[in-house]
C-alpha cells in the first residue's frame, strides 16, 4: 500500500472565502428589508472609526452575480456567507410576516453558486439582529422571546433553502455578540456600564445572560433541524466560535495557568457547554452567580448540539497572570515576548499579529495543556471535525496607500503562507480532521466598528466605483489550493496587473477622500434596469479575461 501523500489535502477538502451579509450587501432599505441593530448604531457619532456605515458596503445585494463570477474565477469549492435575518423576516418575530423578496434573493444566490460548482456554507446569524426585536424586548437579553423568535427564523431558512444547503452555522462568534455588544458597548446594540459609551446596560451581568441565551438559541435551532429537517435534507449543522490561541508569557506556572484561563473565557465559555455539557470551572469560580444558569432540561438540548467544530482563528496572545479584565479571564494579553521582541508582524488592527504556529496549535487543543499546538488541541478535546470558518490578516495602512501598492499585499501573503503550511501539518502530521478553510475575506468590506479603515479582503474594493481587483494574496491562495487539494482541477488564476473590473462606476455615488480614511456618502439605489443593461457587457469582458488567464 502506498504511503499517504503528506503534501496534499483530501480531495473532498472544502476551501473558499467568507463574507457576512451586513458587511457586504448594502441595500438596507431595498426589497422589503427591515432594519438591523447595526443600521442605526453605525450612524451614531463615534461608533465607527471613519464615521461611515453599512448602507452601501460593497453593494453586493445588487452585485451578487458578479461576486459569484469572481469566486468561480478563483476556482473555489465553497463559499461561506450569511443570511440577513431582517431581510427574510423584516421585524424578526415568530408571528411577523416573511419577506418573499428576501427568500427569492437568497434562493438566487444559492442557485447561482451551485450552478458554478460552488457549495454554499450558510451562517444563519452574523450579528445583525432585527432592530424590531431589540425595540420590543431588548433582543438577546430576553431568553424566552429571543429563543422562540430565532428558532422560527431558523426554521424558515431550513424550509426555504435546506434542499440545497447542506452546511449550516447557527451563530458566528457568540463571544463577540455578548462581550462587544453588551459588555464593552463597542458593537451594536452598544450596551455597557460605561456611560460615555451607552446610556444603559450592565457590563457585570448582561454579557453572561446574553451568552447563555445565545447557547440556548443555537441548541434549540439545532434540535429543530435534527428532528424536522435533517432526515430528509441530510445536512450538517454547527456553530462557529472565536478561536485565537493563548500561550503562556513564560514558563512560570502562574502564566501557564493564565493561558488556560484565557482559553476558558474565550473558547470554553461556549465550546464546553455545546460539546461537553458544562461551563468551565474557572468561569464559575470567577463569575459565581453571575454566570447565567442553564437548567437540567436545557442541558439535555445543549450538550452535543453541533455536528462539527466551526473555528474562527486569527492570532495568538501571550498571557500573563494578574490582569483586571474579566472578559479576558483576568488575564493580561501582550504580543511582546520577555526578550522585548514582537510575536509577529503587526496588522492594521491592534489585536492581530501574524503567528502561524498558533493556528496549528488551536485546532489540536485539549484546553488543558497550553503548550501543545492549538489546532490539534481543540480536536483532541472536542473530538469532532474542524471547519476553519475564518482566518485572515489586515495589512497595515492598506486603506491609505495607492491601489497599485495595496494589490501587492506581501504581509497578507506571508500570513496565508504560514497558516496554510500549519493547516497542512495539522492534517497530515498531527492527524487533525480539518475539512474546510475559509479565509476572511473575499472582499474588502464594512469592518464593523472599524468602518472601512481596516481591509481584510483578498480582493481590493474601490469604494467609489465598487470595482473589484484581486490582490496577490488571492493569487497565492488560488495557486496553493490548486496544488494541494488531491485530484483537484487547477483553478483559474487572476492576473493582478490587469485585474478584471466587475462593475462599472456608479455615477450616483458622491465621494470625498481624507488623508487617513476614505469617506463616502451613501449611494442612491441603482435602478434594476441599469444593472441588467450593463451586466452582459461587464460579464463578457470579465469572462474574456478569465479565459485568457486559462490559456
Image (cartoon, rainbow, N blue to C red):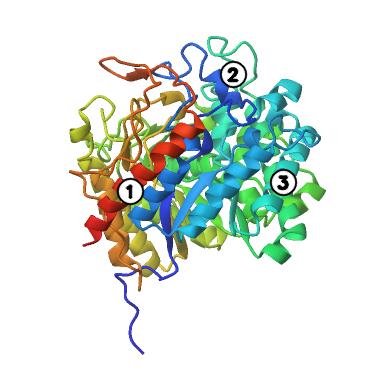
- Say which mark, if any, is on residue 192: 2
User: Marks 3 and 2: in contact by CB < 8 Å?
Assistant: no
CA separation in Å, label 2 and label 1? 51 Å
Examine the rendering and report whether any part of residue 367 can be seen: no
- 338 and 515: which is toward the camera: 515
**Tag 1 near tag 3, CB within 8 Å:** no
Q: Earlier in the sequence, mark 2 or mark 3?
A: 3
Q: Tell me the mark number nearer the camera, choosing from 2 and 3.
A: 3
Q: Secondary structure at mark 1?
A: helix
- Return the residue at label 1: 540
Residue found 77% across the figure and 58% down from its top: 228
**Disc 3 element:** helix
Q: Position of residue 490 (x, y in %)?
A: 30, 65
Q: Which of the marked residues, 1 or 3, is nearer the chain's N terminus? A: 3
Does residue 445 sit above or below 47 in this rendering? below
Circle 2: is it few (<14), some (14-19), or many (20+) Cα within 10 Å? many
Indicate left or right for 431 with 410 as reference. Answer: right
Residue 106, x across and y down, in percent: 58, 45
Q: Position of residue 417 (x, y in %)?
A: 26, 53
Q: Quadrant of residue 425?
A: bottom left
- Mark 2 vs 1: CB contact within 8 A: no
Dot in front, 1 or 3 = 1
Q: Which residue is mark 3?
A: 156
Tell me, yes or no, if residue 94 can be seen here.
Answer: yes
C-alpha span from label 1 to label 3: 37 Å
Q: Is 114 left, or right, of 99 in this rendering?
A: left
**The disc label shown at residue 182, or none:** none
From the image, which quarter does the N terminus lie in?
A: bottom left
Residue placed at 36% from the left, 17% from the top? 519
Q: Quadrant of the C terminus?
A: bottom left
Above or below residue 487? Residue 102 is above
Rounded to the nearest whole Å, what is the CA distance between mark 2 and mark 3?
33 Å
Amino acid at each position: 500500500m502506498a504511503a499517504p501523500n503528506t503534501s496534499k489535502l483530501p480531495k473532498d477538502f472544502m476551501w473558499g472565502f467568507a463574507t457576512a451579509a451586513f458587511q457586504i450587501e448594502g441595500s438596507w432599505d431595498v426589497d422589503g428589508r427591515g432594519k438591523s441593530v447595526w443600521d442605526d448604531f453605525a450612524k451614531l457619532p463615534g461608533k465607527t472609526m471613519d464615521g461611515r456605515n453599512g448602507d452601501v458596503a460593497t453593494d453586493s445585494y445588487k452585485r451578487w452575480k458578479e461576486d459569484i463570477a469572481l469566486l468561480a474565477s478563483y476556482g473555489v469549492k465553497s463559499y461561506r456567507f450569511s443570511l440577513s435575518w431582517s431581510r427574510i423576516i423584516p421585524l424578526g418575530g415568530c408571528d411577523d410576516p416573511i419577506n418573499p423578496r428576501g427568500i427569492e434573493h437568497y434562493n438566487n444566490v444559492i442557485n447561482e453558486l451551485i450552478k458554478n460548482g460552488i457549495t454554499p456554507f450558510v451562517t444563519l446569524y452574523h450579528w445583525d439582529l432585527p432592530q424590531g426585536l431589540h425595540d420590543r424586548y431588548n433582543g438577546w437579553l430576553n431568553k424566552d422571546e429571543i429563543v422562540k423568535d430565532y428558532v422560527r427564523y431558523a426554521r424558515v431558512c431550513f424550509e426555504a433553502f435546506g434542499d440545497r444547503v447542506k452546511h449550516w452555522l447557527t451563530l458566528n462568534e457568540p463571544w463577540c455578540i455578548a462581550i462587544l455588544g453588551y459588555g464593552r458597548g463597542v458593537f451594536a446594540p452598544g450596551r455597557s456600564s460605561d456611560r460615555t459609551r451607552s446610556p444603559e446596560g450592565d457590563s457585570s451581568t448582561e454579557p453572561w445572560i446574553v451568552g447563555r441565551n445565545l447557547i440556548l438559541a443555537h441548541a434549540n435551532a439545532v434540535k429543530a433541524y435534527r428532528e424536522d429537517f435533517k432526515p430528509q435534507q441530510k445536512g450538517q449543522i454547527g456553530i462557529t466560535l472565536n478561536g485565537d490561541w493563548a500561550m503562556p508569557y513564560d514558563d512560570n506556572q502562574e502564566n501557564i495557568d493564565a493561558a488556560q484561563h484565557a482559553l476558558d473565557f474565550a473558547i470554553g465559555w461556549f465550546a464546553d457547554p455545546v460539546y461537553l455539557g458544562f461551563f468551565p470551572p474557572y468561569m464559575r469560580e470567577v463569575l459565581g452567580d453571575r454566570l447565567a444558569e442553564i437548567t437540567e432540561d436545557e442541558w439535555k438540548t445543549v450538550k452535543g448540539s453541533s455536528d462539527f467544530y466551526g473555528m474562527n482563528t486569527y492570532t495568538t496572545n501571550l498571557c500573563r497572570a494578574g490582569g483586571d479584565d474579566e472578559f479576558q479571564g483576568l488575564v493580561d494579553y501582550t504580543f511582546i515576548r520577555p526578550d522585548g521582541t514582537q510575536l509577529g508582524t503587526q496588522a492594521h488592527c491592534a489585536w492581530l499579529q501574524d503567528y502561524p504556529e498558533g493556528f496549528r496549535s488551536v485546532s489540536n487543543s485539549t484546553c488543558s495543556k497550553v503548550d501543545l499546538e492549538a489546532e490539534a488541541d481543540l480536536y483532541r478535546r472536542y473530538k469532532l471535525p474542524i471547519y476553519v470558518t475564518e482566518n485572515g490578516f489586515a495589512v497595515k495602512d492598506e486603506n491609505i496607500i495607492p491601489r497599485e501598492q495595496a494589490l501587492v499585499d506581501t504581509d497578507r501573503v506571508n500570513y496565508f503562507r504560514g497558516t496554510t503550511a500549519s493547516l497542512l501539518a495539522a492534517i497530515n502530521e498531527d492527524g487533525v480532521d480539518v475539512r474546510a478553510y475559509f479565509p476572511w475575506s473575499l472582499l474588502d468590506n464594512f469592518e464593523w466598528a472599524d468602518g472601512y479603515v481596516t481591509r481584510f479582503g483578498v480582493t481590493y474594493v474601490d469604494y467609489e466605483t465598487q470595482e473589484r481587483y484581486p490582490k496577490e494574496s488571492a493569487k497565492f491562495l488560488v495557486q496553493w489550493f490548486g496544488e494541494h487539494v488531491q485530484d483537484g482541477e487547477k483553478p483559474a488564476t487572476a492576473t493582478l496587473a490587469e485585474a478584471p473590473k466587475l462593475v462599472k462606476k456608479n455615477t450616483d455615488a458622491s465621494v470625498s477622500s481624507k488623508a487617513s480614511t476614505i469617506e463616502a456618502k451613501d449611494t442612491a439605489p441603482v435602478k434594476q434596469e441599469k444593472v441588467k443593461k450593463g451586466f452582459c457587457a461587464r460579464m463578457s469582458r470579465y469572462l474574456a479575461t478569465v479565459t485568457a488567464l486559462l490559456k
